Image (cartoon, helix red, strand yellow):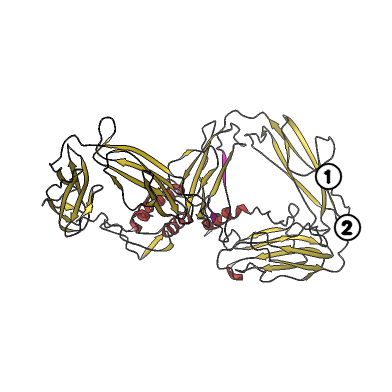
Amino acid sequence: MKQLVAVLLLVLSAFVVSPAPAVSAAPGAPPRLAAQTLTWTADNDITRYKSAPTSAQPGETTIVFENSEATGNTILMSHTLTFDTSTPGYNHDVSLNILANPFDANNGRHTATVTLTPGKYRYFCTIPGHGSMVGEFTVSGDPVEDETAPTVSGTVSGQRDAQGNYVGSATVTVQATDNAGGSGVASVEYQVDDTSWTPYTAPVVVSGIGDHSVQFRATDNAGNVSPVGSVQFRVVEPQQQDTTPPTVTAAVTGDRDAQGRYVGSATVTVTATDNTGGSGVAGIEASVDGAPFLPYTAPIVVDDPGEHMVHYRAVDNAGNVSPEGMAGFTVVEPEPQDTTPPTVTSSVSGNREPDGDYIGLATVTVTATDSGSGVAGVEYSLDGAAFVAYTAPVEVRALGAHTVRYRATDVAGNVSPIGSTSFTVVQPPAEDVVPPATTATVTGSRDANGSYIDTATVTVTATDSQSGVRTVEYALDAGAWTVYSGPIAVGTAGPHSVRYRATDNAGNVAAEKTVSFTVVEPGSDACPNSDNRATVVIRGHDTGVSNKDTGNGCTINDLVAENGEYPDHPTFVRHVQSVTAPLVTAGLITRRDQGAIVRAAAASDIGTRSVHAFF
């Protein structure tokens, strides 16, 4: 479940939400409880909070925001509780922005401690589409006078050597709280090595080589000033050797629908830094949907509808490779709007002289495609005549030069530009009275009896040295004659016969011939000890997908091989992607089924105990 939480939070990272204020206490002091607690709850509704307070007293307050299965959220929907800090007429002294999801690290229940002052506060949900989740509450009464100074402390962080010195630089982080007084921290100041007091707005980086002292103090809103605190440390020259891998992250952006799916396309931006090691990032690699890793040079745009997984990693100039990360998302097709005409092309075929003229007959084939609404119709015009509907290749036998023009119209009414092709038909050198020569071969794996196992492929060949071959036809078993366009694959078990014949451009028809053979079903079971559970289950995660036989005695659970050995978790997820992709192509499972199986693999702990990212 925790792995799924990490996945859900990454998808929601497009709505960048600030962390909620946390309650902190002076070093060594026991934790304090706020004077009052205000609770908000949320469920599946995006039009209102399930419950919310309407009034409160001033002073230190514990805020509780719960969006969980216990409060009625059963569809994994995220909500935020955000205090308004800009609309006129409301108090703007509390900055609160909490994101809660039923399966996040806190199971949807979050707390924060704030200090309320008399007046009116407005709150709302920042997630797009949840705009009607808004309300306000009133704080009445007088706060307790604050006569207690804030508590301030400082910590030093950074890379350290064996003597405890900071290598290259040290970062001083100052923390100030006003839990005892209650009026809240108004400002924090610091100074480095007794220079001058400066407002503290971010951690202070000290990179000068030598010994240092950083002093700090805080003032609350009642004017109380804390005692001056300080930290001492030494910064030494950095070591040259870099043994720390880069840090690499990914963000998925694009237009999204109400379900969080990306409409039309999703863009994956991968960022890598090497601040700790110091040698610098040498390169980034990415893999889309289990494909081989390739160098990452620009954001990756994925526009194929369906569920996708992008793996990524980085290497620094010292050769350190980062842990592999993952980002999962779903792309859906946009609403169709076709304004593009079809693409139409032509080709001319027939027996030709050395100078390119067609002997006795030229056949013009027109092809139209339309990726939008689809082709509605094709028309052609021969030698300037009126356009007529094109329903089959156009045979031109009249001697002389010819031009065929053509165009296509799609279902949306878009008409293609008119194309044309020109050619010349000449008299055959002599009358052709000899039919074409035909042969047929059968190929495939055969058993000891000569039968073809699973599939037999019939290839028909026709030649004509005079006027040339016009058409080749075949009939399978008792079926009708069909134009032969390529090898015929016969996969039905039992005896079969294929009849075949050919016609040349002079109209001579070859004598009918027949080739006979038998197809038998495979007799071996590739997985004699199959996992025959009813549904596909990966380490306790039931996908609900039927555990089908994949055609050779192996079930889908056999292919997943959840008990196999994998060097890490991403490798296992890529394995599951690769073995389920052919099942989608074969029609055994749908893309949705594959998505459910891959999500279960990502949510499992196979290969590792942590999941970097997923939906």
Residue 593: give x, y in percent of width and height.
Answer: 42, 60
Q: Using the image as rendered, state which of residue 312 and residue 341 is in the foreground.
A: 341
Q: Is residue 176 above or below residue 542?
A: above
Q: Is residue 586 above or below residue 172?
A: below
The x, y position of residue 30, in whole percent, is 73, 58
Whether residue 110 appears in this view of the structure is yes
Using the image, determine if residue 31 lies above or below residue 289. below
Foreground pick, 299 / 82? 299
* Residue 152 x %, y %: 79, 49
46 relative to 165, above or below: below
Residue 158's disc is none
Query: Is residue 245 one of those drawn in magenta?
Result: yes
Q: Position of residue 599 (x, y in %)?
A: 47, 56
Amino acid carrying label 2: it is: Glu
Q: Which residues are magenta?
A: 244-264
The residue pinned by badge 2 equals: 147
Task: Identify the residue under disc 1.
Answer: 228
Is 248 included in the stretch rendered in magenta? yes
Cβ–Cβ under 8 Å for marks 2 and 1: no
- Frontmost residue, 329 versus 17: 329
Kind of element beneath mark 2: loop
Q: Answer left or right for 171 relative to 102.
A: right
Please name whichever residue, 610 or 488, is drawn nearer the observer in this view of the structure: 488
Give the class, few, some or many, for how many residues have Cα within 10 Å of label 1's Cα (few <14, many ≥20): some
In which quadrant of the rendered view does residue 527 lie? bottom left
Question: In the drawing, does residue 483 fall left or right of residue 188?
Answer: left
Q: Residues within 10 Å of mark 2 (few under 14, many from 20)?
A: some
143 left or right of 317 in image: right
The reply to whether residue 606 is in sight is no
Q: Amino acid at mark 1?
A: Val
Cα distance in 3D space between marks 2 and 1:
17 Å
